[in-house]
Image: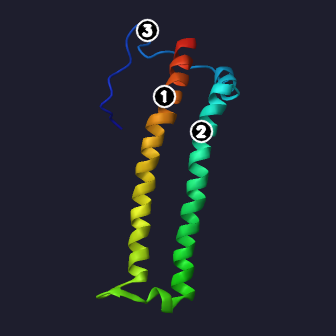
Amino acid sequence: MATDAAPPPVGGTATSPAAPTTAQFVEMQESAEFGELRSSYRSFAFPLTVAFIAWYLLYVLLSNYAGGFMGTKLFGNINVALVFGLAQFATTFLIAWFYARHAAAKLDPKAEAIKSRMEADV
């Protein structure tokens, strides 16, 4: 099997930085800085995940057990079920956009600081 990767350098000199040890990773994982990063992620992701699953289950349950309500015509051939179904797509994209903003503002700077410190310690 052939690859397009260049062969390793001759003479045993490595061009990539040394990787942190397992002990360094464990130490970082137990640090307050990493705990803050994990807490920031979880405080965002878990509530939105629960809210979206509840919203989705509401849509499914209403579709199964409230056919009369979901079949209510709003205007023309547009009914409540179609509006709720399209709202599922809208909320999916809204959550993805909201997460991208949150990650860029809160998670990425903390993660980059941790990464830089781990690479500097090696």
Q: In this view, which residue lies farthest toward the bottom?
A: 68
Name the residue beneath numbered marker 2.
40
Nearest to N terminus: mark 1 or mark 2: 2
Q: How many marks?
A: 3
Camera sees residue 38: yes
**The one of 100 and 19 positioned closer to us in this rendering:** 100
Q: Position of residue 36 (x, y in %)?
A: 63, 32
Depth check, mark 3 against mark 2: the one in front is 2
Label 3, on which residue?
A: 13
Gap between marks 1 and 3, in whole Å?
32 Å
Instruction: Please give the residue where the numbered disc 1 appears in the rendered image.
Output: 109
- Viewer-side residue, 109 vs 25: 109
Above-or-below relation of 27 to 14: below
- The quadrant the N terminus occupies is top left
- Position above or below: 33 against 41: above
Quadrant of residue 49 in the image?
A: bottom right
Provide residue 60's location: percent of width, then percent of height: 53, 78
Residue count near mark 1 (Cα–Cα under 10 Å), binned few <14, some 14–19, many ≥20: few
Q: Amino acid at mark 3?
A: Thr
Residue at image location 33% in from the left, 28% down from the top: 5
**Marks 1 and 2, how far apart in space?**
12 Å
Query: Of helix, strand and loop, which one carries label 1?
Result: helix
